[in-house]
Image (cartoon, rainbow, N blue to C red):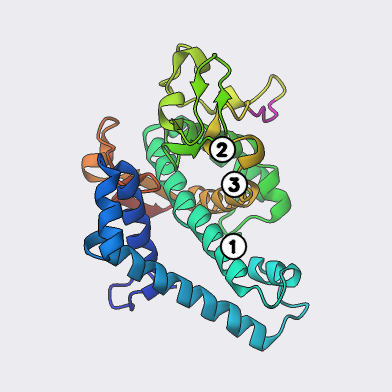
Amino acid sequence: PDCLHVPFPTSEFAVAFDTASLLSAKRALAPFPLLWKIKRFFKIGSEKKLKESIDVINRLAGDLIKQRRLNGLTGKNNDLISRFMAVVAEDDDEYLRDIVVSFLLAGRDTVASGLTGFFWLLSHHPKVENRIREELDRVMGSGFDIATASLVETREMVYLHAALYESMRLYPPVQFDSKFALNDDILSDGTFVKRGTRVTYHPYAMGRMSRIWGPDYQEFKPQRWLDSEGKFRPENPTRYPVFQAGARVCVGKEMAIMAMKSVAAAMVKRFDTRVAGPGSTETALRFAPGLTATVNGGLPVFIQERKA
């Protein structure tokens, strides 16, 4: 509450998290990795700021865990941290802290990024928006008195589910990612990969390949994710690596989708959202460097409450 209110105090954790994310992304984009390694060795410049930010994150995450342990775990504590604390040894707070930070890194900005692309596309596709509203009225009722959907209702929102998957095909929260080969390997096309080689894949580009999605790959079409009976039809994760694939598939995938559906349902049902300013044209969306796809300068919108 009040987090968008100007006088509201800035979160030390949020600032440190944003700084660490940005500087980590700049590492990956650096044309000469040796440069940031030298700065890290001498603890200067951006590497000094990165270390300071990581120290803040670790300290605050550690304090949260310590406070939770002092308060004790009861049946009322059913949040994610409590669940992990119940199965992680009490003397391994560092491991628990890393889990907390990993989940925050994976879910904090990615959900926001995914919703940004979704609402931008929805602003330009009123027919899709109307169909989502028809589904919401059928599942939740036609009034505006119900602010949020239940878990069961959220699972029944098949078309909204498809629309979110389609929006992330065009605007994935993580536009590219890399892996490093543990051993010598050979890709499916016969390409030899030497041990230690960095292999990068690009979900943003893959979502725009006609040989994967057909000649209408540029179109925003949620129905491509539905079968003839209107049921959701998932795509092979190697063709749609938004949540990665195989042993490295995102462990928070279902939680992220549920969060996005809950927010999208609440917003679409009660409000009209239209992009304002430069982002109002379909060719104007530009992204800033970062671990997640963040719209450069933010995405200003007009929000108007709907009338019953």
What predominant SS class does the magenta segment belong to?
loop
* Residue situated in front as seen by the camera: 298 or 60: 60
Which span is picked out in magenta?
230-234
Q: How many labels does the image show?
A: 3
Q: In which quarter of the image is residue 236?
A: top right
Residue 99 disc label: 1
Residue depicted at 65% across the width and 47% down the height: 254
Which residue appears farthest toward the right when viewing the image?
75
Direction from residue 140 to residue 50 in the image, left or right: left
Q: In which quarter of the image is residue 109?
A: bottom left
N-terminal-most mark, 1 or 3: 1
Residue 182 disc label: 2
Residue carrying label 3: 257
Question: The N terminus is located in which quarter?
Answer: bottom left
Disc 1 marks which amino acid?
A: Ile
Tell me where residue 18 appears, x and y as whole percent: 36, 61
Q: Which of marks 1 and 3 is in front?
A: 1
Residue depicted at 46% across the width and 38% down the height: 178
Q: Nearer the viewer, mark 2 or mark 1?
A: 2
